[in-house]
Image (cartoon, helix red, strand yellow):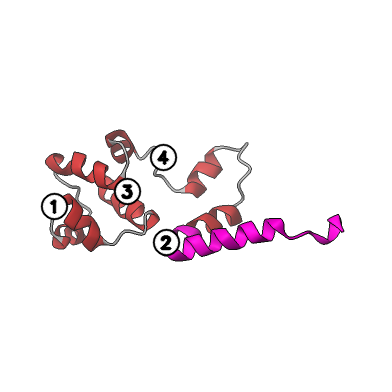
Amino acid sequence: MIISERIIKVLKERNMTQVEFAKEVGISTSTISEWKKRKTNPTAEKIMDICYVLQITPEQLLTGEGIEDEEVIAENRPESRFTPGDVQMIEDYHSLKKEQQKRLMAYMDALKKIESPEEM
C-alpha cells in the first residue's frame, strides 16, 4: 500500500470527507483525486500537515504500521482472537456517521444491561 492509499483508508476510518481533509491540509480536492487516479503520493512538504489532520505519526503514514488492513493484521497474528466477522463489524462501524456510531454504542450498552435468558 502506498502513502496515498493509506491516506484514503484513514479518511474512511475517520469518516472524513475529501473536501474536509483538503480544506484542513490546505490542498485542493483535485490533488487528492490525482493521488487516487495516478497512484501518486503527496509532496514531502505536506506530510506533517497530513499527519496532524489525520492524527497519525509520519512513521505510520510512511510505513503503514497501525494503518494496514485489520484482516492482514489478524492473519499475521495467529494468536489474534478477532475473527473476520469481528473485523467486518469494526469496518462497518467506521463507515457509519458519528451520530450513528453514538446510537450503536448506546444500543450495545443497553443490550449488556438486559438480563440474558441464561441468567434468569
Quadrant for the C terminus, please.
bottom right
- Is 60 located above or below residue 31 in the figure? above
Q: Residues within 10 Å of mark 3 (few under 14, many from 20)?
A: some
- In the picture, the disc for residue 17 is none
Q: CA distance from mark 1 to mark 3?
A: 18 Å
| Amino acid bearing label 1 | Gly
Of badges 4 and 1, the one in the foreground is: 1
User: Residue 110 lies in what quarter of the image?
Assistant: bottom right
**Residue matched to label 2:** 98
- In the picture, the disc for residue 6 is 3
Secondary structure under tag 2 reads helix
For the magenta stretch, what is the residue range?
93-120
Question: Is 105 covered by the magenta stretch?
Answer: yes
Of badges 4 and 2, the one in the foreground is: 2
Would residue 59 be found to the left or right of residue 74 on screen?
left
Q: Check whether the beta carbons of the residues at disc 4 and disc 1 lie within 8 A of each other.
A: no
**Residue matched to label 1:** 26
Where residue 30 appears, as percent x and y from the top left, is 14, 62
Q: CA distance from mark 4 to mark 1?
A: 25 Å
Q: Residues within 10 Å of mark 1 (few under 14, many from 20)?
A: few
**In the rendered structure, which disc, 4 or 2, sits on the residue that comes first in sequence?**
4
| Amino acid bearing label 3 | Arg
Would residue 1 be found to the left or right of residue 52 on screen?
right
- Is 66 located above or below residue 109 in the figure? above
Q: CA distance from mark 2 to mark 1?
A: 24 Å
- In the picture, the disc for residue 66 is 4
Q: CA distance from mark 3 to mark 2?
A: 21 Å
Q: Check whether the beta carbons of the residues at disc 3 and disc 2 lie within 8 A of each other.
A: no
Q: Residue at 42%, 61% (x, y): give it.
A: 98
- Camera sees residue 96: no
Q: Check whether the beta carbons of the residues at disc 2 and disc 1 lie within 8 A of each other.
A: no
Where residue 19 appears, as percent x and y from the top left, is 22, 63
